[in-house]
Structure formats: structure tokens, C-alpha cells
Amino acid sequence: MRLFGTDGIRGRAGAAPLDAATVARVGAALVRARESASQRMRVLVGRDTRESGEWIERELARGLTSEGAEVVSADVVPTPAVAYLTAHGRFDAGIVISASHNPFEDNGIKVFAASGEKLNEAIEKRIEGLVHDPTWQVADTGEPVYAHEDLSREYLSHASRILGDPGPLGGSHIVLDCANGATAAMAPRFFRSLGFHVDAIGVSPDGRNINLKCGSTFLTPLQERVVSTGARLGIAFDGDGDRALFVDHQGRIVDGDAVLLMAADQLQKENRLPGSAVVATVMSNIGLEIALRDRGIRLVRCAVGDKYVMEEMQRQHLVLGGEQSGHVIFSDHLMTGDGIGTALQVLRVMDATGKDLSELAAALVTYPQVLVNVRVRERTDFTKVASIATTIEAVEQRVAGQGRVLIRYSGTEPLLRIMIEGRHQDEITAWAEEIATAVRAELADR
């Protein structure tokens, strides 16, 4: 059984692989998987606001401490805080307990190496092998004993260096939607400390309302609040705080593609964009590729998942990459996505250019795009199902030369994602539904 997907281990809390016994084995296996055991392993653990987070933390700590590791809990903190603190706090690994944008019933385990980067696949496979190895068991050591420390100030001090003095932006009215998640307590206080007038929503987590009609996956409340209050912009984080989407003063959504374009353009002007290239996934709109090319910047595409974005950035020695969904990596800041950091980078571009978000976002002219998700029974090779393959081929012939067709399985859910870009919204919507109908007939989870 494969444990790790594109964003760590994820599933329904309480069910395999996130049942108590397996979670404890994952913790113990992480210690056992070390290549060097010359000293006691120190592990930092953080979590989001899901009700299952506390018991998953205890079971992880039980497994970790059974193998002699020292565990420090940062309690509720964003994913990027764990990444930064792991790399700068003398920890050998960092663990985040979160299912990001998923509903509260789900949870997950993401592991960072001592460098603050997500584990590579070789180490993930080593951990998986140990978890499935029946020749050892987690020692019964009783209730785990581990420390709880408030380390958020160190992470925020690092983040604040991105913007520094907000200059003319100081006092601007901004709206934050914290998704009732990991940034709920931290982000409003932080942005107020920088001199912004902050209106915050999605800041009342109860263990079950994380991402519930709020945050970066449901932008309507943020759009309405920005427009009704006359705010300068709105910022929406996801449940674990590693991504951000934006809303301009007119309530229009500004996604990760637009953020990549404005950030790349500014870094290029500052001679801080090595290789004159940016990494984005196959999901980024073709309009981003065209706009970057017009500015002398190359777009490098990779598979969906911020770990793949980071790997490609490292491979080509690049400093900027991201996803349309709002995961944006500024490697000079952190080796993973950071919602608060991304928000500060956007504000920095606004300050440097003297332009509002709406004007910056208007530089990206996007092709119409449609995305249809079909829930499937299992990940069958759809290219070998005749009726599906024939339908896809027919649509690709219609789109040829004027857009893209991309069909892939989700890395975290049992979904087949059908994405089409083209010149006319009504056409691509109909074509996507053609493919979805063929998929439902053969593979749908009934």
C-alpha cells in the first residue's frame, strides 16, 4: 500500500493509513529510516485546527519517542512555519499534521527534512517499507512525553523581512480570510503589526469548520467583504497556510498564475531572476506562458504538486515557481509554499511599482479554461479504455492549435481531473463534459 502521495500521507482521520497504529508506526519509521543515528533525533511537530490533529500528534509522538527521538510541538502553526523552524531550529525533521484544503474529516502527515524541504521519494519509500515491515513493532512506552513551545515569533520575524517598511501601503485596509485554519490566530495580528488596517474573517476555528465555505477554496465571502467595506485587497489562505489567493478592490479573483507573472516581472527588473525562468505546473494557463515569453522569461512546466515545483526549481537553479492554486515558492525566502510570505511578496510588488493589485493582475490575459472532476472507483489507465480514449482524441483534434487538453488523476483524492483551455468558453465546457460523460460511464464511483 502506497502511503505518500504528492503532498505527504493523506486520508480520512481514524481510517487507514491515518489510524492510530499506523500513525505511530510512521513516527517510529521516520526515526528508523535515518541514515545516520550518531545522536538523538529532534523532531518538530505542528498542526492545523482539525479536531483530529491532537490525537494524531500524540500517536506520532508515541512512535517517535519509542525510538528515542526528542519531540517538540509548536501546536497550531502554518506549514511554512514548520519548514522554516525545522531548518533554523536545529531539528532533524519537521512534521505537519494537516490535510491542507480538504474538509475537516480528512487529515494528513507531511514531513520536512532538516533543510526545510519536503522529503524526497527515496526517503518516503524507505519509510513506507519500514511501516509495512512486520518484523518489528512500536514499543509500548505509555503516554508520550514531549515539549510544547511557542515558536511562531521566529517564523514571523523571518517573513517580515520580505516587505520591511510598507511605505505608502501602510494603513491600507485589507481583508484576510484565514479559512478557520492554521493562520487564524497568527495572520491578523501579524499584518496589523506591519501597519495595515485588517478586517479578518475565517478566524473562529472549532475543529470542524476548517475550509468550510471560506478560505482559498471558497472565495465568495472574501469577495463580498472586500467590496462592501471598500478594502484595497483581500487575501485568502488555505487550511494549513501554505498558499494564498487574492481578491482585488473590485472583488475579482487574482490566482497563482497572476502572482507568478507579477513577481517574475519585478524580480527580472531587479536582476534577481536567475536563468530568466519560472517553474509552473501543467495546470497553469497558457496565457501565463505567453505573457512571460513577451517579457523574455521562460516558463518551465512540471507535474502538479508543489514538491515537483520545488524539485524542478532546484534542478534548474531557479528562485520562483508555483501553482495556479496559490502555492508559490520564493526559494530565497523558503523552500516551500508560504501563504503569508506570498501575500507579503504581492504587497512588495505593489509598493515597488506603485500599482494596485487590479492593475498588476490585468497584465495576465488568460485563455478560457474549464476543469471538471469525476470521482472514480480506482485509478484505471483511462488511455486504455477504448470509449474514453476515442472521446479524448476527438476533443484534442478540435482543440489543436488553439488551446490545451490535460487529463490527470488527483494526487490526493480519487478524482480524474479534466482540464481544457481554448478560445471559447462554451465550446470547451461542452468538450470537457463529453469526456466526463465517457469517464462516468466506465469509471465513476457509483
Image: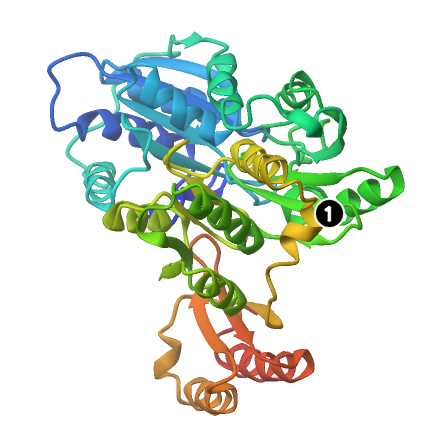
x and y percentages locating residue 157 in the rendered image: 50, 16
x and y percentages locating residue 288 in the rendered image: 51, 62
Q: Quadrant of residue 20?
A: top left
Q: Residue at x 39, y 9 (%)?
A: 146
Is 298 rendered above or below residue 426?
Answer: above
Of the residues shown, which amino acid type is indicated by label 1?
Asp
Is 434 rendered above or below residue 292?
Answer: below
Is 162 rendered above or below residue 255?
Answer: above
Q: Is residue 38 left or right of residue 231?
A: left
Residue wearing tag 1: 248
**Residue 205 visible in the shown view:** no
Q: Quadrant of residue 373?
A: bottom right
Q: Residue at x 52, y 19 (%)?
A: 156
Q: Is residue 34 left or right of residue 246?
A: left
Quarter of the rendering occupied by the C terminus = bottom right
Crowd rating for badge 1 (residues with CA inside 10 Å; few <14, some 14–19, many 20+): many
x and y percentages locating residue 149 in the rendered image: 46, 9
Q: Residue at x 43, y 89 (%)?
A: 393
